Amino acid sequence: MGRFQDQVVWITGASAGIGREMARQFADEGADVAVSARRAERLEAVVSEIESRGRRGLAVPCDVTDEAAVRNGVERVVEHFGRLDVAVANAGFGVVGPVEELSAEEWRRQFDVNVVGLALTAKYALPHLRKTRGRLVLVGSVASMVVRNNVAPYSSSKAAVRAIGQTLALEVHGSGVTCTTLHPGFVESDIAKTDNQGVLHEDARDKRPSKLMWPTDRAVRVMLNAIYKRKREYVFTGHGKLFGFLGRHWPGLVHFIGSRIWMPER
């Protein structure tokens, strides 16, 4: 018996990376899994992987910036499976560049996906999670706690995710529902290969530090453990814990390091 045996899980941003690996591992833990993303053509492959593990899968194409699509998506999940036990708001991407060079459109796109889309996912999942005393999961980032040059939109969007997670944990307290906000450090994913318009470039080079990168399967094992234990907030990897601590408690040191080592990338 898996830890999520016969539960129903809905994951946004599930066509690749962390979301896709979550779908696999939730299925390995006994769950039936619905997967959502904009790239509908990729979802059927994820469903096949779920079904190959002996569990039921469902592809629900969904753009989280479209409120009607989010509402209809969760309703389709519940109509198909009859319930919802875990909702994972994982859809997101990163806008990069110096603040003085970014457009209003780029800022809006960053917040529409990472913040508004996540909040809408929570809004429409919660009524169903209340019925099952389920789990709401928000995927944040260590970038919410420690900043680097050229990632102001991403870091600020994830700081908003952290605030939403802390607020939701209060709002659902006592209802039987729990809200877990996960803050990964560097994890293998497509995020560094996605441009400021949200378009994936498969052949793009990931410029993040390879020596600090966690493989996706290892990261997801840690994430599922935190979800199962209903952690309110969980920071990982090892370097993520360190940088997150420094960012929260030693911002002057982070500035010193950033201004002398993390030189502006132009």
Image (cartoon, helix red, strand yellow):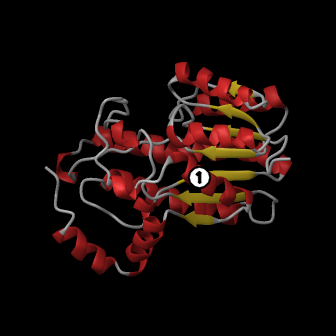
**Relative to 130, does residue 168 appear above or below in the rendering?**
below
Residue for point 84% across, 48% down: 132
| Secondary structure beneath label 1 | strand
Q: Where is residue 61 in the image (x, y as percent from the top left)?
A: 59, 24
**Residue 16 relative to residue 94: left or right:** right
Residue for point 64% across, 47% down: 122
Residue situated in front as seen by the camera: 234 or 91: 234
How many residues crowd mark 1 within 10 Å: few (<14), some (14–19), many (20+)? many
**Residue 222 relative to residue 5: left or right:** left
**Residue 260 relative to residue 157: left or right:** left
Q: Where on the picture, by quarter, is residue 75?
A: top right
Amino acid type for the residue under numbered disc 1? Leu
Q: Where is residue 60 in the image (x, y as percent from the top left)?
A: 64, 26
Question: Is residue 185 in view from this perspective?
Answer: yes
User: What is the residue that sits farthest to the left in this orientation?
Assistant: 266
Residue for point 33% across, 63% down: 147
Residue situated in front as seen by the camera: 59 or 160: 59
User: What is the residue that sits farthest to the front in this orientation?
Assistant: 211
**Relative to 7, does residue 98 appear above or below in the rendering?**
below
Residue situated in front as seen by the camera: 30 or 234: 30
Residue for point 17% across, 51% down: 100
* Count of number-bearing discs: 1
Residue situated in front as seen by the camera: 68 or 58: 58
**Residue 70 relative to residue 255: left or right:** right
Q: Where is residue 33 in the image (x, y as percent from the top left)?
A: 72, 35
Q: Where on the picture, by quarter, is residue 109?
A: top left
Q: Position of residue 134 (x, y in %)?
A: 78, 51
User: What is the residue that sits farthest to the top in this orientation?
Assistant: 41
Q: Where on the picture, by quarter, is residue 107?
A: top left
Which residue matches tag 1? 138
Question: Is residue 59 in view from this perspective?
Answer: no
